[in-house]
Amino acid sequence: MTTTWEDLVTSALLGTDRRPAPPDPHLGPGPGVVPGPRSPAQDPPTALLDAAALHTLRRRAGLAPAPAGELPPSAPEDTRPPLPAPARHRLALLLADRAAPAQSGGRRGSAPDLTELLPQWLAAANRHRFQAPADLLPALLDAARARTDLRPQALEFAGSRGLWLARLNPEWKYALRGTAGGTALPDVQDAEAVRKLWEEGLFAERVGLLGAVRAAEPAAALVLLTTAWATERAEDRLMFLDSLRTGLSGRDEEFLEQALSDRSRNVRAVAAELLSALPASAFGARMADRATSCVALDRTGDAGGIAVEAPHECDAAMQRDGVVAKPPAGRGERSWWFGQLVESAPLGAWSARLGGRTAREIVRLPVADGWAEELHAAWCRAAIRQGDSNWARALLGAPSVPPEAGTGTASLAERAKLLATLPDGERADWVAEFVSAHGLSEAFQLLGVCVVPWSGALGRAVVDALDIARDAGSYPWSFSGVMGLAERCLDPGEADRLEILTTTPDEAEGASPGAGGYWSEAFQRLVGTLRLRAAMVRELEGEG
């Protein structure tokens, strides 16, 4: 049996005394050498070095230490149209990673960063349904191996030929995850193929299959799940249950109710979370009864408001419905139970409980005894879980109001999730007003949930805030993250309007040393990137 390079490495690491190198039938004693008890050819360290030298020569010569295997099957045909020549050339440049090197002091310089444009190029190419050039597939798969954010778009662009090629190189095995044994998943309409893979496939294959079926036919995925649910491992049940987030509807309620009695606490928790996203469910009614019994209008004073009486116990029925009895460290039991009840209750229950008031009126009511933060935070989680844009607007409040003085939550992370429930245009307008009122120091997370390209109002607000920061002599590197977002998200048509910002301003008194030059470079890079993005679009449309 031929010795492998891995065998030699193992012997070298463990020592030839503990792990002698396996004999290699291709390795002789050499011309004129007769092996003997004291021959150097019999010395284990010498034998190891001889074998390593032979393997090195083989590797350098490109010789395989075994007979050649069978040729792989031919690559499948890709019927998508080929890329226009300019777009193909652009892709080659982007994959070559020819970004300008960083300057001294960590400055990025004025040249666009090509690596940050690759995701946008791939998204645009996929919208046009172009096929990937065969000679660029290896570089594309290498790029996606190094960057997980590229993988969905890159694999869609690579298509069936990309999967075919990935099966030939272990370094590209990431591309085969979610496929059946490295091949495409069966057609979800092929009931027999789906059943066979579900019953006989590996766990990763079954997860991918369930997700594909759920996206196409939610009811069929639920049938698959019920057939083997009782025999699945707890960790597998948890992953399978998570697939129901796609296409969640009232048809899933009966199954989720049964999952509330699962022997795994984690499975019960996910089932409860999914049921709480179905306000019309029986689970929602039970949670509404519990939560509203803890909250009432405060009629003891003249100002009015909300009074809270948190639960005094977490009974078996509450725990069966997913309420975790033991709080995390530093958290009181009653507030912990109360928050879980409110976040799981349908938001529609609060108007009737609190005098027919609207969501906006409810969140403005004062809350007695310091319960406001807990109550509002739970309402935020409920609005996010239920996708309730009306309550999200109420909890966000006016964008001009400072977060710490608002009616809902001061957490920017929670605000970003609330914004995600709003329509695209409304979301962009809200963030634009927030940036205009408060600047960019707290806006990064909020900008991240806005659709690309940014609307005109949002783009202008961001650029104006950057310009104001420059004129104020602000430390320029603190805005590099927002500047990077602007390069990727601004409308490319804004490039000409922003040209005026590329000049180097006079140094303001008290400004950071060299700030003017940095700002000039940053705006040059912004304008250059926008023009490059516009050129990419033209090339993909055949106008380059």
Image (cartoon, rainbow, N blue to C red):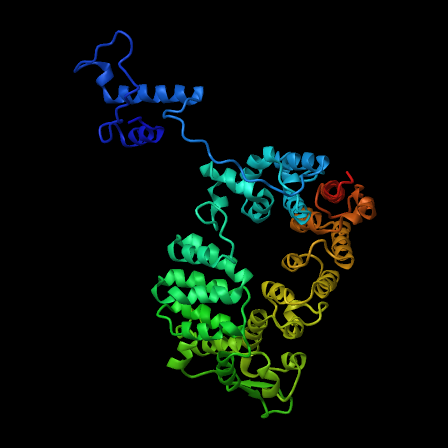
Total number of numbered discs in the rendering:
0
Identity of the residue drawn at 16% across and 16% down: 37
| Residue 120 drawn above or below residue 417 | above
Q: In this picture, is 480 found above or below 314?
A: above
Nearer-the-camera pick, 445 or 449: 449
The answer to which quarter of the image holds residue 432 is bottom right
Q: Position of residue 351 (x, y in %)?
A: 62, 84
Residue extending farthest to the left is 37
> Which quarter of the figure is the C terminus placed in?
top right
Answer above or below: position of 333 versus 42.
Answer: below
**397 to the left or right of 281:** right
**Residue 239 shows in this picture:** yes
Q: Is residue 176 above or below residue 380?
A: above
Q: Position of residue 168 (x, y in %)?
A: 47, 36
Extreme residue in the top direction? 32
From the top left corner, tell me how far across and down residue 252 is, in percent: 49, 72
Front residue of 428/63: it is 63
Q: Identify which residue is drawn at 45% across, 79% down.
A: 334
Q: Nearer the viewer, residue 68 or 111?
A: 68
Q: Residue at x 51, y 60 (%)?
A: 213
Q: Quadrant of the N terminus?
A: top left
Tell me: 138 left or right of 257.
right
Picture residue at 58% right of the left edge, 47% below the top:
156
Report which quarter residue 52 is drawn in.
Answer: top left
Tell me, yes or no, if residue 103 can be seen here.
no
Residue 6 in percent (x, y) is at 34, 31
Residues 526 and 366: in front is 526
